[in-house]
C-alpha cells in the first residue's frame, strides 16, 4: 500500500514481508519505539534491503576503529552536502545520542567547517566531503593529511566507504521521497551540553 507520509513508493505491511526482514523491523521497533521510515521504504525491495542492511551494519556497527559518533558525523556532513533531509534528521538524532551532545548534529549539518570540531574531526570530514563530491581528485596528499591526523589505513578506508555508501543511500532516500519520522526531531535534544 502506498503511504506518501513515508515514501512515494508502496510501503509494505510487516505481515507481508519475508520473515527475516519483518523480524528485524520488529526488533528495531521494540528497541526504538518506532520503525524508521527508511526501513519501510527500502523494504519495498527485500533483496536490495538485505544487501543495504548488511553493508550498513558492516560499516556502522563495528566497535574497532572510528567511534560510532565519528561514523555518524560523516553521515550527517555528507548527507547535508547531498541535501538528504531524511538522513540529516535521522542520523543527526543518532549523532546527538552517540556524541552526548545536543548541538553537534545541527552545527555539522549546517556547515561543519564552522562547527566546534577538533583538527582530527575536521580532517575526517574534509576527506569525507571530498569522497562525496570529488573523489576523482583524491591524491596521496589527501591520505597523508589523514595519517597526520592520526587515522589508520583501516579508518581511512572507513571514512571513504561510509561517505560513498551514504551517497548511494542519500540518493535512494531522495528518489523515494522518504520522510523522516517525527520522533527523530526530538531524540537527544535533552542532553546537557558540554561545558565550553
Image (spheres, rainbow, N blue to C red):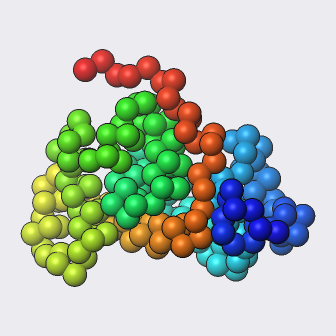
Direction from residue 39 to residue 130 in the image, left or right: left
Would residue 31 be visible to someone looking at this image? no
Direction from residue 175 to residue 34 in the image, left or right: right
Query: Percent position (x, y) of residue 165?
Result: 45, 70
Query: Percent position (x, y) of residue 91?
Result: 49, 49
- Residue pictured at 13% horizontal, 76% vertical: 139
Direction from residue 76 to residue 58 in the image, left or right: right
Query: Percent position (x, y) of residue 41?
Result: 67, 66
Which of the pair 18/43 is nearer the observer? 43
Outermost residue toward the left in this view: 141
Query: Percent position (x, y) of residue 103?
Result: 37, 32
* Image: 170 above or below 31: below
Outermost residue toward the right in this view: 15
Which of the pair 146/41 is nearer the observer? 41
- Residue pictured at 62% horizontal, 42% vertical: 182
- Residue pictured at 25% horizontal, 55% vertical: 124
Direction from residue 74 to residue 152 in the image, left or right: left
- Residue pictured at 47% horizontal, 72% vertical: 171
Q: Considering the image in quadrants, where does the N terminus appear?
A: bottom right
Amino acid at each position: 500500500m502506498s503511504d506518501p507520509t513515508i515514501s512515494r513508493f508502496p510501503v509494505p505491511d510487516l505481515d507481508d514481508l519475508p520473515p527475516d526482514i519483518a523480524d528485524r523491523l520488529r526488533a528495531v521497533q521494540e528497541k526504538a519505539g518506532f520503525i524508521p521510515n527508511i526501513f519501510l521504504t527500502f523494504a519495498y525491495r527485500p533483496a536490495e534491503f538485505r544487501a543495504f542492511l548488511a553493508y550498513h551494519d558492516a560499516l556502522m556497527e563495528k566497535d574497532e576503529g572510528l567511534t560510532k559518533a565519528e561514523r555518524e558525523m560523516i553521515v550527517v556532513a555528507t548527507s547535508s552536502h547531498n541535501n538528504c533531509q531524511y538522513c540529516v534528521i535521522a542520523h543527526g538524532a543518532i549523532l546527538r545520542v552517540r556524541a552526548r551532545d545536543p548541538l553537534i548534529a545541527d552545527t555539522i549539518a549546517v556547515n561543519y567547517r564552522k562547527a566546534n570540531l577538533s583538527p582530527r574531526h575536521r580532517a575526517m570530514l574534509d576527506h569525507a566531503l571530498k569522497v562525496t563530491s570529488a573523489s576523482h581528485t583524491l591524491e596521496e596528499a589527501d591520505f597523508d593529511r589523514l595519517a597526520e591526523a592520526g587515522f589508520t589505513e583501516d579508518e581511512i578506508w572507513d571514512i571513504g566507504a561510509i561517505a560513498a555508501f551514504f551517497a548511494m543511500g542519500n540518493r535512494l532516500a531522495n528518489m523515494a521521497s522518504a520522510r523522516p519520522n517525527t520522533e527523530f526531531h526530538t531524540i537527544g535534544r535533552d542532553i546537557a551540553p558540554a561545558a565550553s
